Image (cartoon, rainbow, N blue to C red):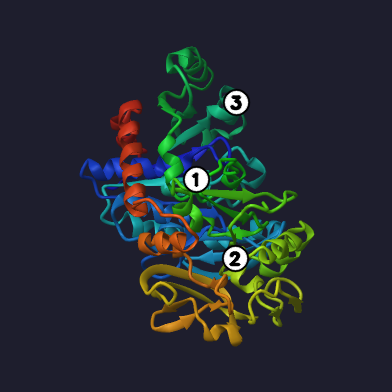
Amino acid sequence: MTHAIMLQGTGSDVGKSVLVAGLCRLARNRGLRVMPFKPQNMSNNAAVSDDGGEIGRAQWLQALACGVPSSVHMNPVLLKPQSETGSQIIVQGKVWGQAKGKDYQKLKSQLLDAVVQSWDIVRAGADIVIVEGAGSPAEINLRAGDIANMGFAIKANVPVVLVGDIDRGGVIASIVGTHTILPAEDRDMIAGYIINKFRGDVSLFDDGLKSITTFTGWPSFGVVPWLKDASRLPAEDSVILERLVKHDRRALKIAVPILDRIANFDDFDPLIAEPDVDVVMVRSGERLPTDAELIIIPGSKSTVGDLQRFRENGWEVDLQQHRRHGGHIIGICGGYQMLGKTVSDPYGIEGSAQTVAGLGYLDVDTVMEPEKIVRNVEAHSYQFDLPLKGYEIHLGQTTGPDCARPTVRINGKADGAISADGKVFGTYMHGLFNADAFRTALLQSMGISASAVDYHAGVDAALDSIAAQLERVLDIDGLFALKRAG
């Protein structure tokens, strides 16, 4: 019988995704066939799975940690926020529909069959499955029809380990409060807890562990220190972008505006890993730095809405100044669409049917179309004559005179556009900077020599390091032996 454990958090961003990835790698290193699973996720930082659909970036990384091909069944329900109140719903890798938050609560029960079907597929043949919850089980206002936390755990009869983040403070109250607020049936699913992101002498928290166990009756499976290697892994939750604002002065400064519906922002991780590159994530209300040599406009789940916010932030004026001073500009996916002359949404895919003026740095026009392109791709850089691998997740077709100077060749077909002076280009391809040779050539074209950073090897090494640390500080034998009766 397949063993399974589920990590749920006392709140969002407590580090569940990294812990699951680390436990997956640890299990693999022990010789187990391990699989990841997350019933429901909410993120615009999606990946294209090996079987050709959309899943959360964290589940893609967790599959990598397991050493198995990624699958849409590892994250059967993915919500991609398009506005403050509504999301696109992806089921088993494909667009299922759209719904506002209130309406989605009524739809959850309809999605349970897909979740259970995917669960049966993922666990077939596995020795152990590490499951990740979403948000917090203590959100009892969302408990009815839940498929993300306790609703799934009870349906699949999977024991739960609660994760608390001590770095944000109040961890004792958050764990004890979760115990207090949960109904008895949910509370009984929890087999113990883990304290995450501890800094300093762990013995100073011995009394804290005793207090939690006294109040809840739950045992501790250990205290995890602050995992520095987590910063080397692709992040899924955009809240991390608020912490990436750097103030180093290095050889090359690259600025990236944080769009409201920024998507696939892990595109920039390989650039962040470069020791001579300062990637500045620019928050709403801040100005694009005048000393940036390159500005990259990232992908977006809402091109028209984010283009409006781009202008409201004053970034259009900053970009004009940057261009007058000879600066370089790159647009990726939604950012590529924004760089054109117009963006048309005749079907009202992102809201009302409309055509808006783009930023005008590329002589191209984009028309949003209902069919979504989701695929992994083999590509080639025209500019540097180098091979690339990446993926596409986008709506819309872009055409115009500047497309005669394409950026890349994707699966044998030209994609993207380059300005006449070569300093502005856009493409629909994500993962452009993951290719070490391409990244080196791009940075050298801007006057610096890139280091010998092997980005993919760095991610793999980080997973091994995190797994080794978890082996030292957690009761892994106890965790992996957990099982429910029946």
What label does residue 133 carry, if any?
Answer: 1
Chain-order first, disc 3 or disc 1? 1
Image location of residue 334, percent across then percent down: 60, 69
| Most foreground residue, 12 or 303 | 303
Q: Residue at x 46, y 47 (%)?
A: 276
What label does residue 203 carry, if any?
Answer: none
Q: CA distance from mark 2 to mark 1?
A: 38 Å
**Badge 3 element:** loop
| Most foreground residue, 160 or 437 | 437
**Badge 1 element:** loop
Image location of residue 426, percent across then percent down: 56, 72
Residue 53 placement, left or right of 23: right
Find residue 326 and report its image quarter.
bottom right
Q: Residue at x 40, y 64 (%)?
A: 438
| Most foreground residue, 73 or 398 | 398
Chain-order first, disc 2 or disc 1? 1
Residue type marked 3: Gly
Q: Is residue 78 visible?
A: yes
Q: Which residue is mark 2?
A: 329
**Badge 2 element:** strand
What label does residue 169 carry, if any?
Answer: 3
Residue at the left extreme, as displayed:
31
Residue type marked 1: Gly
| Most foreground residue, 340 or 177 | 340
10 Å crowding of disc 1: few (<14), some (14-19), many (20+): many
Residue type marked 2: Ile
Find residue 379 and report its image quarter.
bottom left
Instruction: Check the image and report above or below for 54 versus 418.
Output: above
Q: Are marks 3 and 1 in contact (CB under 8 Å)?
A: no
Q: Are marks 2 and 1 in contact (CB under 8 Å)?
A: no
Find residue 27 and report its image quarter.
top left
